[in-house]
Image (cartoon, rainbow, N blue to C red):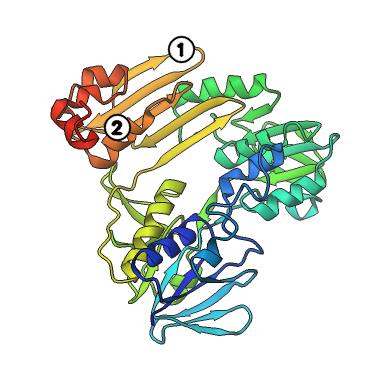
Amino acid sequence: MKRYVIVGGSIAGVSCAEGIRSRDGEGEITLVTAEPVSNYGRPLISYYLEGKTDLRRMSWRGEDFYERNRVNIRHATAAEKLDAAEKQLTLSTGEKLSYDEICLCTGSHPFSPRFEGLETVEHRFFFTTLADALALEETVTKESRVLIVGAGFIGLKCAEGLKDRAGSVTVCDLAAHAMNANLDGDASAILEKHLISNGLRLMLGNTVTRFEGQTAHMQSGETVDFDVLVIAIGVRPETAIFAEAGGDVGRGIKVNERQETSLPSVYAAGDCTESLDVSAGEPGVLAVLPNASMQGFCAGVNMAGGGETFDKGIKLNSIGFFGLHIMSAGTYTEPVYEEVTDTGCKKLFAKDGVLTGFILVGDVSRAGIYTALIRNRTPLDTLDFETLKREPSLLPFGRAYRAEKLGGAV
């Protein structure tokens, strides 16, 4: 009977267990996670703060997932050392777990610059785990002045979650635009206008130079007084345990299309990995939920002796702020379609005859069609792309394609 170990209990780890069970109904699966709880949707923690969900509904696969899949779960237990030669994992308890196959789904950790005076700040938080959300829930009051450093995905979702809980929310960022890593100037301008109209204060192109207790001294010379600080500048892949074991690490743990690493019988999946971005044609960290889920399942199948591959990885973001929906995907190369209004925008990008990326703000309906074109690198000259630019549907794919994919519904 095979012994499987999974490190990490988020979507990649859960999907890995599912992948194993799809091939092996008898093997012993042990999942180790440093968190006191697992199997919950991290992107949902802002909705928890808003009161739009609860702990039970945040579960990825139901509260009985581990029991149903006969997974031995070890909460509040960190993985401290990987010995690939001996096939052993040392835990924070001192215990050594032996394995036949192991998958590292270690995710990422928050990144924070060394702000002068940060240690003088009372009530400072990150915003990447349920524990962070619960701590903020306990600390923030209707009178709290909240300062969030970082106007990316994490910072803005935190701002949305705290907006009605706090007295005021200010978001600052060194970048000149909100969600600068995902959106261009036109899309960011629409988002920023919407955020301000919903009561957020934005200080863009302006960040903290030093803290003095509960006062932030800004690059512009202004000062911001606050009660609660959230650092949301970004995250980094958690690769330490693998690197210390002698594994090959770039920006993340390097994996092939089977999710295998450079160490024998060691797989990796999710935000900790670096894999091929098919839209860019080069490796990258593709730290988004759909990729993590597919990578985890792929790793699990292969750990159990299967032949699964994951070769459709792309950058992908689907998010909403105060009712404004945003989707972006892939790599922004040559613009081939652009439509911008005061309340929304649509931009498509292509290179070498295939769609490489898109930005949608406002109307994101049927965006999955564009996503599929990017993932599959579908040649645009094989379909009616002129029609597809304006209105995504299956009609431009032609009768033969629809007959094949839709079982005759043409």
In the image, which is nearer the foreground, mark 2 or mark 1?
A: 1
| In the displayed structure image, the side of residue 251 where residue 378 appears, left or right | left
Residue 16 image point, x, y percent: 42, 62
Q: Which residue is mark 2?
A: 333
Determine which of the numbered discs, if any, sits on residue 214 in the image: none
Up-down relation of residue 159 to residue 137 (above or below): above
Mark 2, secondary structure of its residue: loop
Does residue 218 appear in the picture of this structure? no
Amino acid type at mark 1: Thr
Q: CA distance from mark 2 to mark 1?
A: 22 Å
Mark 1, secondary structure of its residue: loop
Up-down relation of residue 45 to residue 300 (above or below): above
Q: Disc 2 or 1, which lies upstream in sequence?
A: 2
Residue at 84 percent of width and 34 percent of height: 142
Count how many numbered circles sit on residues in the image. Answer: 2
CA neighbours of label 2 inside 10 A, class few (<14), some (14 to 19), many (20+): some
